[in-house]
Amino acid sequence: MCLGGGSALLPAPIPPISLQEKQDVTRKLAGAGATIQELNTVRRALSMLKGGRLAHYAHPAQVVSLILSDVIGDPLDLIASGPTVPSEVWPEEVLSVLERYKLLNSLPASVKEVLERPSPSRSHKTDESSRSGRVLNAVIGSNSVALKSAGRRALELGFRPLVLAPGVCGDVRAVSKLYGLLARFACSREEPPPEIAAELLKLGPEVGVESWDLCRTMQVLGEGRTEGWGSTCLLAGGEPTVELTGKGQGGRNQELALRVGLELRGMQLPPTGPVFLSGGTDGQDGPTDAAGAITDGGLYEEAQAQALDVNNFLTNNDSYTFFSRLSAGQRLLVPGLTCTNVMDVHMLLIPPIPINIG
């Protein structure tokens, strides 16, 4: 079984790199906001078993890898750093990632030594087991599967499901703005101003949402408004990132929910919505017991009434503490560990919108 967390559980650093040194590099990258793709690119370059080398060492045994994808786009070579999927990582590619996050000058000497070695010609070795048909890699779960299941459940509960995209990524600040704009577009009692659509189409590629998906989503939401549909459940998923500036307790889902709550503030929205949820499918968001949080346009006023300074909590990346103190933690999503990680699910519940006529 190959799934999220596999990279951490199968570290085996290339000598002379120590496990501690490899962990330090990974933590610094994650703290700087590196994507899971970038993290796994660096991990593979520093590992003895990733990038198909586990399957190579198992040859000639038959290897069957059942994969739960926790990476956007389901690239087999990046899920758990691809221990059964042959792939080559060039030192230049790794150095580019490290330079992007300004970590080149702080690398341990052992890591520099490994990255400065000539790229080994091991393609014929790592591909041998794959070419001989001794390795089977099969994706049995992904974010797309989770969104389809969530859509079926939403339909059973009386909502009209609408899937936006399974590849939402980028900084949570930009992602929260996307959901705020979608809420404004969906909840307009009249035809939304064209500036909203233009801003959405400009922002979409920055957060991993194709223009086609946004156009399709806006078209469906527009039809729902003019035809008087009931409540809509807009679904998306992926894995946004958070740039750490503080030392608080939280995770990307709770911070995203907090920021979306601010985006919804001040809009002319119906009293009953919209409501936004962001949760990790593994049941854990960061080093907390929560998977995420639920928010709406009343979040800011609720926090003010309880003397909670939202901006201070955001600056310190302390979203878990914020939601724990806000109304005794009622907005926290705490399902417990699920043992299944296919990234995050985002849900925007949009109530029926009364239309202004004539």
Image (cartoon, rainbow, N blue to C red):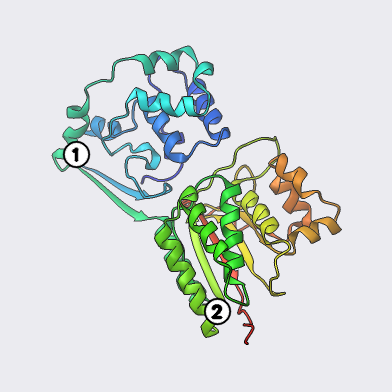
Between 293 and 349, the one lying in front of the other is: 349
Looking at the image, how many numbered discs can be counted on the residues? Answer: 2
Name the disc covering residue 276, or none.
none
Image vertical order of residue 273 relative to residue 239, above or below = below
> The disc labelled 1 sits on which kind of residue?
Ser
> The disc labelled 2 sits on which kind of residue?
Arg
Answer left or right for 147 relative to 87. Answer: right
Residue at point 72% right, 40% down? Answer: 315
Name the disc covering residue 225, or none.
2
**Extreme bottom residue here?**
358
Structural crowding at the residue carrying mark 2, measured as other residues with C-alpha within 10 Å and reported as few (<14), some (14–19) or many (≥20): many
Residue at point 32% right, 26% down? Answer: 90
- Image coords of residue 150 (percent x, y): 48, 67
Q: Which residue is mark 1?
A: 130
Residue 63 occupies quadrant: top left
Give the mark nearer the N terminus: 2 vs 1. 1
The reply to whether the C-beta atoms of the residues labelled 2 and 1 are less than 8 Å apart is: no
Q: Secondary structure at mark 2?
A: helix
- Image coords of residue 72 (percent x, y): 41, 49
